[in-house]
Image (cartoon, helix red, strand yellow):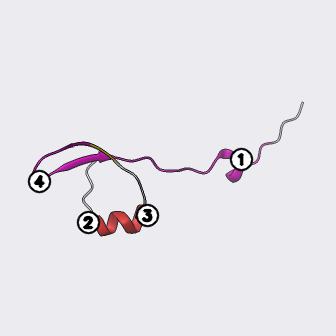
Amino acid sequence: MKTEMTLRELSDEFGKDKKIRVLCEDENTIVFTFGKNQKPLSEGYSFEMGM
């Protein structure tokens, strides 16, 4: 998957304080990763058990 965004678009979408990990870079390209925070299951779902 390849996506192109400006730094401003990245900031708007993911937050300006989001931390990234730079995997490699050269004069024209930077490859990085980041983790998305997801809601814990208990916040978004409820489960019932019965016998």
Work out how far the residue at label 1 is from the one at label 2, CA to CA, in angstroms.
Answer: 35 Å
Residue 6, label in figure:
2
User: Along the polypeptide, which appears first: circle 3 or circle 4?
Assistant: 3
Residue 15, label in figure:
3
Q: Secondary structure at mark 1?
A: helix
User: Along the polypeptide, which appears first: circle 2 or circle 3?
Assistant: 2
Q: Specify whether 37 is left or right of 33.
A: right
Residue type for callout 4? Asn
**Labels 2 and 3 touching (C-beta < 8 A):** no
Q: Residues within 10 Å of mark 3 (few under 14, many from 20)?
A: few
Question: Which residue is located at x 39 percent, y 47 percent?
Answer: 34
Q: Residues within 10 Å of mark 4 (few under 14, many from 20)?
A: few
User: Along the polypeptide, which appears first: circle 1 or circle 4?
Assistant: 4
Work out how far the residue at label 1 is from the one at label 3, CA to CA, in angstroms.
Answer: 24 Å
Residue 42, label in figure:
1
Q: Specify whether 26 is left or right of 17.
A: left
Residue 28, label in figure:
4
Q: Specify whether 37 is left or right of 47.
A: left
